[in-house]
């Protein structure tokens, strides 16, 4: 690791690499309003906030403007999946900086979709219309932060209540008392092949799905007053989950694809979850949710990820990233292909670098 490079330097190198590879409008899946671009560009925005390079903000705007027309209508998104709501988080800084009411109109389209999204009998959002009755951890990141910010900006507190309810319900349904970790998904109907017939739970703790949880809820807490009735519950949720995650950090400093089975054949160290955990630990310390001593584990995680990177000329390569996956058994997760510089991985990497810049 180059000791002279700071986290922001790695973040900028990663942004530059991706901007050379993709014109904004070509980010995959091209022409589709989707969380792949949303998480990546959220990381680009955090990098912009730290370095002030206006090209980064323009890149975000160019992508959004390639999807949203002059009337604020969003093209090519699926109202039946939360994954296609998440990029709406980018509309807030665009609205602030430009004052363009197209972005307000797009937000006003997206938020009622979340409010009216299908729910199971316990009130939990389906992951998507094609996954009826199922709650997946990923969904907390897709729908929660955008609701919390909307509630605070536009005096609609019901959206903050909705985000808090989904997080606490997910904890109730998926948290494992023995490990403190959360299973990837829960099927209210107990019908899915992957669901335990008695509990409805999936069988493994998948790294990246768990990583979305504290990242999302910490962002929600930015818009919640400490006096809010659910504030301390959400802080305790984050604290308990991150304390549990930290117990499974590898000697290398990263975390495994299947978090609790680091020594088992087939398992491997996964970059995106390691980035998300590291980012969440730092932010939780800054919020006073975790003691400062946890920064040691964040630094260890960050340095391990940095050591895993490769360079190809000026291009920074973020590898060891699990491609998207459904719910499955141990073998299913272990056999998922890895990718280099996919949007999941680079987005998580940028979020980590932004947080680490505050401590290094």
Image (spheres, rainbow, N blue to C red):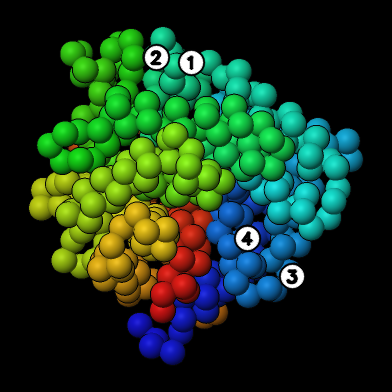
Q: Residues within 10 Å of mark 3 (few under 14, many from 20)?
A: few
In front: label 3 or label 1: 1
Q: Is the C terminus in the top left, top right, bottom left or bottom right quadrant?
A: bottom left
Percent across and percent down for residue 181 are 23, 40
Q: Earlier in the sequence, mark 3 or mark 2?
A: 3
| SS at badge 1 | loop
In front: label 2 or label 4: 2
- The residue at the point 69 percent across, 42 percent down is 153
| Residue pointed to by mark 1 | 119
**Marks 4/1: CA–CA distance:** 32 Å
| Residue pointed to by mark 2 | 122
**Marks 3/1: CA–CA distance:** 41 Å
**Marks 2/1: CA–CA distance:** 8 Å
**Looking at the image, which is closer to me, 336 or 228?**
228
| SS at badge 4 | helix
Q: Check if mark 2's residue and mark 1's residue have beta carbons within 8 Å.
A: yes
Q: Residues within 10 Å of mark 1 (few under 14, many from 20)?
A: some
Q: Earlier in the sequence, mark 3 or mark 1?
A: 3
Q: Earlier in the sequence, mark 2 or mark 4?
A: 4
- The reply to whether residue 142 is in sight is no
| Residue pointed to by mark 3 | 54
Instruction: List the single residue furthest toward the front.
Output: 227
Percent across and percent down for residue 68 are 79, 40
**Marks 2/4: CA–CA distance:** 35 Å
Which numbered circle lies on residue 45? 4
- The residue at the point 64 percent across, 51 percent down is 27
Q: Is the N terminus in the top left, top right, bottom left or bottom right quadrant?
A: bottom left
In front: label 3 or label 2: 2
Q: Check if mark 4's residue and mark 1's residue have beta carbons within 8 Å.
A: no
**Marks 4/3: CA–CA distance:** 10 Å
Q: Earlier in the sequence, mark 4 or mark 1?
A: 4
- The residue at the point 43 percent across, 20 percent down is 124
């Amino acid at each position: 690791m180059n000791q002279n490079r700071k986290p922001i330097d790695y973040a900028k190198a990663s942004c530059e690499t991706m901007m050379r590879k993709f014109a904004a409008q070509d980010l995959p899946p091209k022409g589709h309003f989707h969380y792949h671009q949303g998480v990546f560009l959220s990381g680009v925005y955090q990098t912009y906030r730290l370095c002030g390079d206006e090209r980064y903000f323009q890149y975000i705007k160019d992508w959004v403007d390639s999807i949203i027309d002059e009337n604020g209508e969003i093209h090519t998104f699926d109202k039946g999946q939360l994954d296609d709501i998440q990029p709406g988080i980018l509309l807030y800084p665009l609205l602030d900086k430009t004052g363009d009411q197209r972005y307000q109109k797009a937000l006003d389209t997206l938020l009622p979709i979340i409010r009216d999204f299908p729910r199971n009998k316990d009130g939990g959002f389906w992951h998507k219309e094609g996954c009826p009755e199922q709650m997946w951890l990923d969904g907390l990141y897709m729908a929660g932060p955008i609701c919390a910010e909307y509630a605070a900006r536009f005096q609609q507190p019901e959206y903050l209540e909705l985000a808090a309810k989904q997080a606490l319900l997910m904890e109730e349904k998926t948290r494992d008392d023995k490990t403190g970790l959360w299973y990837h998904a829960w099927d209210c109907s107990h019908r899915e092949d992957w669901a335990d017939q008695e509990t409805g739970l999936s069988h493994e703790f998948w790294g990246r799905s768990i990583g979305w949880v504290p990242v999302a809820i910490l962002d929600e807490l930015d818009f919640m007053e400490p006096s809010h009735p659910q504030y301390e519950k959400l802080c305790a949720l984050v604290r308990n989950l991150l304390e549990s995650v930290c117990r499974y950090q590898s000697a290398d400093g990263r975390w495994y694809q299947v978090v609790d089975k680091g020594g088992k054949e087939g398992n491997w160290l996964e970059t995106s979850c390691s980035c998300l955990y590291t980012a969440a630990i730092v932010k939780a310390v800054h919020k006073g949710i975790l003691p400062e001593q946890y920064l040691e584990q964040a630094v260890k995680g960050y340095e391990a990820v940095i050591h895993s990177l490769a360079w190809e000329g000026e291009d920074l390569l973020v590898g060891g990233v699990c491609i998207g996956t459904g719910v499955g058994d141990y073998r299913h997760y272990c056999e998922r292909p890895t990718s280099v510089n996919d949007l999941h991985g680079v987005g998580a990497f940028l979020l980590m670098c932004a947080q680490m810049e505050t401590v290094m």
